Image: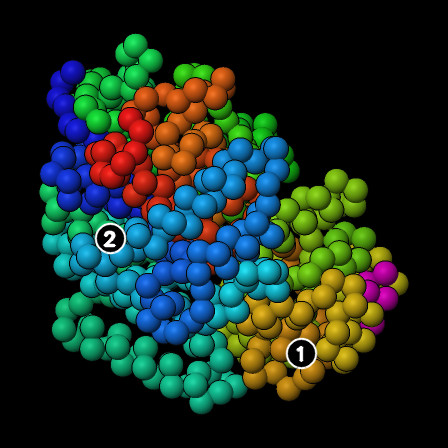
């Protein structure tokens, strides 16, 4: 070996920093290797939310939850299936036990976290569901506190100095005094930050900024531009990795273990074509380093891989001139909008889990062309709600119309012709949807029945349901919607200690996996906001505890 550490971590996502902190708290040396030039992974680009049931912040706020309630919920939503070995009952129970302990550990390390006051579970109507939610986020973070490392932190997806809760309230400034207050509050905060030389980050940027700060303070060695080419196995045991340094192969030993937390394969089109057909790298918001390198390396070692066809779906549209795909989950959940396939027929609840939404598009496309599907809106929607980066009531970029991205028509039939849809079919769909909107009951797909659907809607809407509003005022508009994602969801099968398993079910000693390089503990579901990041942190925590022999655990 060219050098040796106690623990080597591949990738710099949230679980990596968490594992590093655990190891350093035990007095062990840690090296984190990041192949790109920036630290933070897809976590830094995300909303930065962790789904952790029964956490300390829920207890402090008097929000009821328990291990038993959360177990009931995951049993109902995720369930036991032979084709989801990453989501066994034992692994789900380990996540539910260790997640709250992980949060307590981070708080003890000085990482400032808080709960979202109201963010319902995505299946809150199922047994054990929480209407107020189990989501945790980081406090806003001044990236200047990182010193020279601030240039090494991957940029987040949200540029305003506002929490996610504040961000959700901002677009309601035309409808409520609360929205106006939030605009003033965030604007003043931004002004004060500018005057005092602060650069405040929110969401994933804040979470990873705080994790990076804590890891650096604890003495974790973090290296960028250091991709891993190979996991070194000797006598069946993981003993290190091969990376690159100064233009040559560099062998790094790991006395206690190697943790794989290197992201997924969202930016590898060949792997997408094999495991996630009818999807594209151009539709993904995952970090650019998610090219499946470590998935292929694990396959070379004979590791059991599972749930490879799953992704954390995120419904997107591609407005011309925008720097990245625009999410439309929040918009499609608002009144005065619905989704149809290319036959002009509505085929799902437009609210709910974004992962399930995108699975529905792909499933529909197998029988009826649905990629892209069409988001149908009326003038009421355009006046009241944001779309992409444009504010409510604002004039949409002329380029959108000139390049054929946004279609319009004075009547629903004219809109259908502009989209290449059957006018009679779209008119019938619209009339049926409008009937549901007037009664507040979606008899076809139950949009608005769950608290989460209503939260996605408009709390200020003057109608029988905050999730339903008639599409009836011309001119009408439509844009194409695609099954995008924020990352893949399948990978190495691991046990309750995050140890990687071979195809014969045996453990590869000292080799661990967390994050989306591993098969998700959530199987084929996304139970709530942060159901990818929460487990990533938790399994990094579990792996490091096991490797450092903290507690009574098998070697």
Residue 227, percent from left and from top = 28, 28
First in sequence, mark 2 or 1: give its number: 2
What range is drawn magenta here? 425-431
Task: Judge the density around disc 2: few (<14), some (14-19), many (≥20) Cα neighbours within 10 Å.
Answer: some
214 left or right, relative to 19: left
Quarter of the image holding residue 50? bottom left
Q: Are marks 2 and 1 in contact (CB under 8 Å)?
A: no
- In the image as oriented, which residue stretches furthest toward the front? 552
Determine whether 170 is above or below 542 in the image. below
Task: Judge the density around disc 1: few (<14), some (14-19), many (≥20) Cα neighbours within 10 Å.
Answer: many
Determine whether 115 is above or below 275 in the image. below
Image quarter of the N terminus: top left
Residue drawn where x is 59% and y is 45% of the image? 79
Quarter of the image holding residue 188? bottom left
Residue 543, percent from left and from top = 31, 36
Q: In front here: 283 or 51? A: 51
Residue drawn where x is 41% and y is 16% of the image? 301
Residue drawn where x is 81% and y is 53% of the image? 343
Q: Which residue is mark 1?
A: 465
Q: Which residue is mark 2?
A: 105
């Amino acid at each position: 070996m060219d050098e040796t550490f106690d623990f080597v971590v591949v990738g710099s996502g949230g679980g990596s920093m968490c594992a590093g902190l655990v190891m350093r708290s035990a007095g062990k040396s840690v090296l984190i290797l990041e192949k790109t030039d920036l630290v933070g992974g897809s976590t830094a680009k995300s909303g930065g939310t962790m789904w952790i049931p029964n956490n300390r912040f829920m207890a402090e706020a008097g929000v009821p939850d328990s291990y038993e309630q959360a177990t009931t919920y995951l049993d109902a939503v995720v369930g036991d299936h032979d084709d989801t070995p990453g989501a066994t009952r034992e692994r789900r129970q380990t996540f539910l036990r260790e997640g709250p302990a992980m949060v307590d550990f981070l708080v003890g390390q000085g990482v400032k976290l808080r709960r979202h006051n109201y963010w319902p579970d995505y299946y809150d109507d199922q047994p054990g569901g929480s209407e107020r939610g189990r989501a945790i986020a980081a406090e806003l973070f001044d990236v200047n506190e990182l010193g020279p490392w601030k240039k090494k932190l991957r940029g987040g997806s949200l540029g305003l100095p506002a929490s996610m809760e504040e961000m959700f309230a901002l677009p309601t400034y035309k409808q409520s005094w609360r929205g106006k207050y939030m605009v003033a509050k965030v604007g003043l905060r931004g002004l004060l930050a500018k005057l005092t030389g602060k650069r405040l980050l929110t969401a994933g940027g804040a979470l990873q900024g705080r994790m990076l700060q804590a890891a650096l303070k604890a003495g974790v060695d973090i290296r960028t531009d250091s991709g891993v080419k190979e996991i070194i196995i000797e006598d069946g045991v993981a003993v290190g990795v091969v990376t690159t340094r100064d233009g040559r192969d560099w062998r790094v030993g790991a006395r206690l273990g190697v943790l794989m937390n290197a992201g997924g394969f969202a930016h590898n089109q060949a792997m997408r074509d094999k495991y996630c057909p009818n999807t594209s790298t151009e539709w993904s918001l995952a970090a650019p380093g998610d090219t499946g390198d470590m998935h292929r390396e694990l396959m070379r070692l004979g590791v059991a891989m599972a749930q490879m066809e799953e992704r954390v779906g995120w419904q997107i549209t591609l407005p011309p001139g925008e720097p990245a795909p625009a999410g439309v989950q929040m918009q499609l959940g608002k009144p005065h909008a619905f989704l149809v396939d290319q036959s002009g027929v509505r085929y799902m609840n437009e609210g709910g889990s974004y992962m399930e939404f995108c699975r529905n598009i792909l499933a529909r496309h197998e029988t009826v062309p649905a990629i892209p599907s069409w988001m149908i809106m009326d003038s009421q929607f355009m006046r009241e709600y944001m779309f992409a980066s444009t504010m409510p009531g604002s004039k949409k970029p002329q380029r959108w119309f000139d390049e054929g991205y946004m279609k319009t028509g004075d009547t629903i039939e004219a809109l259908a012709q502009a989209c290449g849809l059957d006018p009679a079919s779209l008119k019938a769909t619209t009339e049926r949807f409008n009937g549901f909107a007037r009664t507040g009951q979606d008899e076809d797909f139950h949009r608005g029945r769950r608290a989460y659907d209503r939260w996605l809607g408009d709390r200020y809407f003057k109608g029988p349901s905050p999730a339903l509003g008639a599409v009836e005022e011309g001119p009408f508009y439509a844009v194409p919607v695609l099954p995008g994602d924020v990352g893949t969801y399948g990978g190495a099968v691991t046990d309750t200690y995050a140890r990687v398993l071979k195809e014969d079910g045996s453990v590869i000693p000292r080799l661990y996996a967390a994050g989306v390089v591993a098969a998700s503990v959530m199987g084929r579901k996304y139970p709530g906001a942060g159901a990818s990041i929460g487990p990533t942190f938790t399994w990094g925590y579990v792996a490091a505890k096991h490797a450092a022999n903290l507690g009574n655990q098998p070697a």
